[in-house]
Image (cartoon, rainbow, N blue to C red):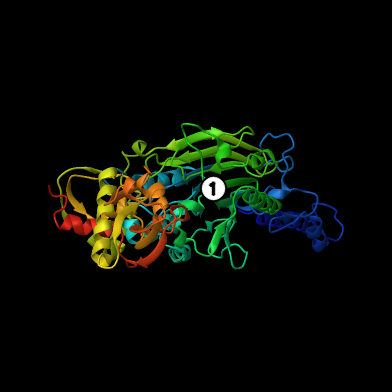
Amino acid sequence: MGNKFVIKLLSLILVLVLFTSALFGCFDYPDIDIESILSSITTTSGDTTTGSATTARGPDDWGDYPADHSDVNNDGLCDDCGIDVVETIDFYNFNDLHGKFENMDDNEGVDELTTYLENRKNIDEHVVILSSGDMWQGGTASNGTHGRIVTDWMNYLGFDAMTLGNHEFDWGQDAIKTNVAMAEFPILAINIYDNATGKRVDYCQPSVMIERGGAQIGVIGAIGDCYSSIASDKTTGISFKVGSALTSLVKAESEKLREAGADLIVYLIHDGTTYKDINISDYYDVSLSSGGYVDLVFGGHTHSYYITTDAYGVPHLQGGGDNGKGMTHVELDINFANGEVDINITDYVEINSVQNLEDAPIVQELLDKYWDEIGWMYGSLGYNAYNRNSDTISSTVAKLYYEAGIERWGDEYDIVLAGGSLNVRSPYYVYKGEVQYGDLQTVLPFDNPLYLCKIKGSNLKSKFLNNSSYTVYSTISASQVKDNQYYYIVADSWTALYAWAQCETVELYDETTFARDLLAKYIQSGGWSK
């Protein structure tokens, strides 16, 4: 029963008592002016109290009027009305899921984690689910849908915000825009700018305000200094503001959110440090903490797992990569009357701790939904006689690059080398047994087309032949190379378009043939059957 109704009822009862008393002569009252009696009683209109009495509002009303409350003595109760002004919030953050949606050989999917979060949302009053980036690229189903199956799952689970990571760009900016249009939650990136307009790109926003009970939570998202981790053809026309420029953007956005009533500022940044040598300054300007601009930081990108606190008491968390560690979790109390924030718990929700839970049906439901697009990726290509590690995979790909180049351009150009930075991804193996295209999609997820390139001899030696970080197949040794002579090589776009490699592209192989496609044909032909 609402306060407004109670007061009106009491007013009516009082008037009836006075009227009845006068009518039956119980008391010697003068003429009764009912309207004046009603107007003299304290009334309420909506949530705004008038008159001398104060009416406590219920929980449903707190979020609209947090500024009405005070808690000078910090006892958790409003000094005036006595209501509880402390909200307990549970934050769960995913980083670097890398499309590990369905269960795979070396990676668990999200089925049990989904059940866990659904259970927590039924137990805990206020839950916030976030992501600090690299959610889409990596797993078979997610790669096959360019992240859409993961975005669908995030919608189902009720994510509150996500920031972009570098691997969100692996299929180009159009794929990002498609997922943004699908997402029922904001996708953030405060520091990605359009080079032509000088303004922030229009497919993501800098921040969002989330309300939980009486507490207002500002969430700011940013991509770290990982522009060089993205193939250059995927970032055409945009740039990232990093370093002091990023700090300035975050400070200004934090001030804006504080002015709008934010009690807490959460910073999602797709960047981080390493668990072996935790150094927050690797990716974070501590003036954001010392100045009160940020209260909680969820990181990513480095695939490290750590829970630490900076010199100013601000927690920093990252939960590994490829869904290996699960989620990071923070439980905290926000006093929305005086701004006090108390951290209660910082921990991981690890995959192995939820394996006893039932699989959430949504995972299979979404696989069924997209099966017409992705089903073919689960069929067998052929038999693999041994476990093939990342070195074997990349060496095989380098040779297949060379053979593809010779077949296409060999009559016209003397090609002496193929390969480059051939990055194999988790699980870093193609296992013994029947091989699916999805297995190759997982270890070789990048859509990097092949190029015929021209390179000066001195660079061929320093960048390729004498570079241990590159994997190459070569018909020439470094001692045979003449520094001032030009040579022809084959490399994919990740290497060919990388300025450091000093390659000059001559011709594109095509737009749709990638490393995994060449390897798939090789396995189909029996290449790994012995």
Pick out the residue farthest to the right: 30
Q: Residue 509 at what x, y percent from top left?
A: 32, 66
Residue at figure coordinates x 43%, y 59% from the top left = 497
Would residue 348 be seen by someone viewing this image from the given angle? Answer: yes
Give the image quarter of residue 484: bottom left
Q: Which of the two residues, 120 or 164, is positioned nearer the viewer here? A: 164
Residue at figure coordinates x 46%, y 31% from the top left = 276
Count neighbours of disc 1 (C-alpha within 10 A) and say few if under 14, some if 14 to 19, many if 20 or more.
Answer: many
Amino acid type at image mark 1:
Ile
Would residue 84 be seen by someone viewing this image from the given angle? Answer: no
Q: Which of the two residues, 323 or 237, is positioned nearer the viewer here? A: 237
Q: Which of the two residues, 373 or 442, is positioned nearer the viewer here? A: 442
Q: Which of the two residues, 182 or 469, is positioned nearer the viewer here? A: 469
Q: In the picture shown, does residue 276 fall above or below 39?
A: above
Q: Residue 336 at what x, y percent from top left?
A: 66, 44
Q: Residue 288 at what x, y percent from top left?
A: 65, 43
Q: Which residue is mark 1?
A: 269
Pick out the residue farthest to the left: 530
Q: Is residue 402 left or right of residue 288?
A: left
Provide the secondary structure element on which disc 1 rests. strand
Give the image quarter of residue 487: bottom left
How many discs mark residues in the rendered view? Answer: 1
Residue at figure coordinates x 66%, y 57% from the top left = 5
Residue at figure coordinates x 16%, y 53% from the top left = 527
Q: Is residue 484 left or right of residue 336?
A: left
Q: Residue 82 at what x, y percent from top left?
A: 69, 40
Q: In the picture shown, does residue 35 fall above or below 361?
A: below
Q: Is residue 168 left or right of residue 526?
A: right
